[in-house]
Amino acid sequence: MTSRSAHTDRLLLPPPGGPHQVGTQALCLLDPARADPWQAHRRRKLMVQLWYPAAVCAKAASRTARYLTPSVAAHVLQMWAEEGEEFGPDLRDALAGARVHAVEDAPSASGPPRPLVLLSPGLGEYRAGLTALAEDLASRGFVVASVDHPSDAAAVEFPDGQVVPHHEPEDQEEGSTPDLETRYLATRVADLRFVLDQILAPDSVWRGLLDTGRIGVAGHSLGGAAAAELARLDSRPAAVAVLDGSLFGQVLSTGLDLPVLLCGLTPPDPEDPDVLAGWDQLWPRLRGPRRHTTVDGAGHMSATDFDALAGPLGLRNTDDPDDVFHFGTLSPGRGITLVREVLATFFTEHLMD
């Protein structure tokens, strides 16, 4: 059994690139009409992180929000652990001790109603893992809702202290496409629709801040498949961005009429040539404005915060082919910087201009 330790005193995410200061607020949402597919005796409960342009005074600017709780940080690191490997408490504390750039519960900035962007992370990931994307979009004038998908996520901690770790359903074969299309994909789409329902409800404090005709949805990996499928089923999204990973679901047959970004982060895999078959199938069925771009030198995780955090945490090994797949060949933090620019350009064009 081996153990790794952190090599940093402070983890830093890339600063947002827009002109606005950023606030953040966590929401706990209970869907009384839906059983949790992983815990059938419970109703489906979600955690959502809101990011938004904020009015932050100089005194409050230093009170930035925490990145992760210690409990979630431990689960996130365990998802990255190789067989027989353990991470020391200093590494967990380093990840839990990171701060974001946003100020918790800061008042929203004045201005006209703003576009809303939903973010859905990859399988086994977590809502905070897309913080660099969310903060950057918020700094450019968007309201962003990053959604945790409990049991699918690395771990989700609720306000009462309950922690729901990643859990593979015992009655399904891990990683198989039928499983992903049934329970995983359907659950994520239902989660995203419910979040939209709650944020846009007449009594929601957020509704007055939003332009309900300018809604985008973006996802990384499995989250991208969920974003595309949501747009097939729900008329509210006006633009969709898919950040790497396989595509599947009925959207491959029906196509979409709205603007779509397909952003590839990994080169073709000769051992798995069909991984992007869904992209080829969907592309000719995109009837609205469409863009297919590849971030050269990036890796699958370049859309996430780990592109910037893995190096300081001692979790990058450039000699390991798996690490090259995850992080590519760009310098630490460069991948997420490029992905942010691609995503912001797309949503600015289709939700703001």
Image (cartoon, rainbow, N blue to C red):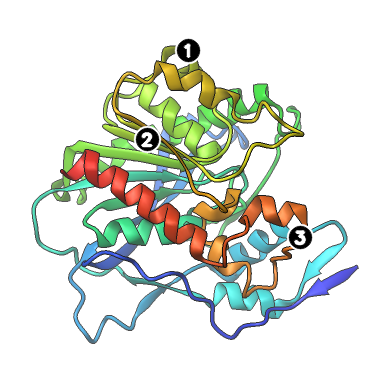
Residue 194: which numbered mark, if any? 2
Image-based side of 94 in relation to 304, left or right: right
Is residue 348 or residue 34 the one in the foreground?
348
User: Which badge, 1 or 3, is on the more N-terminal residue?
Assistant: 3
- For residue 118, which quarter of the picture? top left
* Residue 158 in view (yes/no): no
Residue located at (62% from left, 59% from top): 329
Q: Amino acid at mark 1?
A: Ser
Percent from the top left, x then y, of residue 210?
18, 46
Camera-side mark, 1 or 3: 1
Graded by Cα atoms within 10 Å as few (under 14), some (14 to 19) or many (20 or more), the crowding at tag 2 reads some
- For residue 242, which quarter of the picture? top left
Question: Helix, strand, or loop for circle 2?
Answer: helix
Q: Which residue is mark 3?
A: 81
Percent from the top left, x then y, of residue 188?
49, 34
Q: Which residue is mark 1?
A: 253
Question: What's the CA distance linking mark 2 and mark 3?
Answer: 33 Å
Query: Exactly how many numbered labels are in the figure?
Result: 3
Graded by Cα atoms within 10 Å as few (under 14), some (14 to 19) or many (20 or more), the crowding at tag 3 reads some
